[in-house]
Image (cartoon, grey):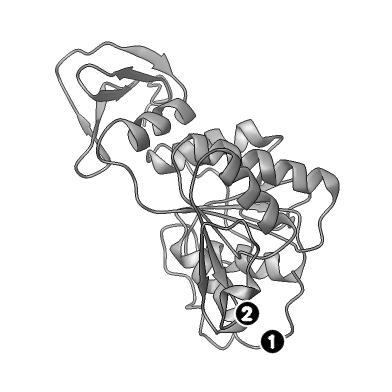
Amino acid sequence: MSPSVDRTTLRLDRARRTLRDGAGRVFDLGSHTWRSDAVAGSGEAVGAAAAVAWLQRESGRPAREPIGVVGGRHATHAQLAVARALGAGLAHAGLVVLCGGRGGVMLAVCEGVADGGGISVGLLPGDTIADGNDVVTIPLPTGIGLARNALIARAARCLVAIGGSYGTLSEVAFALQYGKRVFGLEGAPAVGGVAHLPDVDAAIDAVGRVVLGLDPDPYPPPPGDAPRGEPRPAPHSPDASRSSGTEKD
């Protein structure tokens, strides 16, 4: 792509139900991909978050993949505040939030989603919804313990990590191995491939660009890992399953 072409500028024509970028492409609501369009268009300038809110709430063809939010059960006040704000922001954008459904960051993000009138899904490690917090909209007992971390990473469109310890690190690692984008806030694991962002607004904008297929993915994979777009070792390979332990967050 030529550096002189700006594909990040978005223009939304609500009357014609069209979203265009700065390169003249139009967002296809059927396939959720960008296609060239020779017809000149107009519309109001919008950011990624506003464009996603339109897609989810007004277009009639919303994206269905949830956004994963992960973090520790033992979190700081700052991390909990960030999680609540992120949950509310994602809910306002019409995005479903997927998390571990328990306490700490997971509870805080569910509280934010509830405040924003959205839907949260919690993949619980145990056999009953009693494992979950009282706020998560849809608690799903998996009965598979720590292995549910891999399900969260696989099912999410992208992942936002807030603080966390070993459990969060495992979810981040799985997401990167699956080729998902991972964004970090407020002390998220400092590993290659995680894009650390300054605040919740930046995270919601970044998530929006992933949902819209505008994310340039400029962050390199961890050293020694396969380049993005090339196969990574399967999560059940010997290198990925060499160790096990108890849940830390």
- Disc 2 crowd rating (10 Å Cα; few below 14, some 14-19, many 20+) is many
For mark 1, give the secondary structure.
loop
User: Eyeballing the image, is 90 above or below 249?
Assistant: above
Quadrant of residue 88 within the rendered picture: top right
x, y percentage for residue 53? Answer: 42, 32
Whether tag 2 and tag 1 are in contact, CB under 8 A, the answer is yes
Taking the spot 78% from the left edge, 50% from the top edge, the residue there is 187
Q: Quadrant of the N terminus?
A: top left
Q: Residue furthest left?
A: 39
**Callout 1, which amino acid?**
Ser
Looking at the image, which is closer to me, 173 or 132? 132
Q: Nearer the viewer, mark 2 or mark 1?
A: 2
> Residue 150: x and y, percent?
54, 73
Residue beneath the point at 41% across and 33% down = 52
Q: Please, what is the three-letter code of the amino acid marked with disc 2?
A: Leu
Task: Identify the residue shown where x is 60% and y is 86%.
Answer: 241
Q: Position of residue 14 (x, y in %)?
A: 28, 19
The residue wearing badge 2 is: 146
How crowded pointer 1 is (Cα within 10 Å; few <14, some 14-19, many 20+) is rated as: few
Residue 19, image quadrant: top left
Left or right, 237 with reference to 166: left
What is the distance, in whole Å, between disc 2 and disc 1 at their CAs? 9 Å
| 41 relative position to 1: left or right | left
Query: Is residue 224 at all visible to an observer of this figure?
Result: no
Height in image: 218 above or below 71?
A: above
145 left or right, relative to 140:
right
Q: Secondary structure at mark 2?
A: helix
Residue 114 rendering spot, x and y as whole percentages: 57, 45
Which numbered disc covers residue 193?
none
Pointer 1 residue? 244
Residue 126 vertical placement versus 161 (above, below): below
Sequence-wise, the earlier of marks 2 and 1 is 2
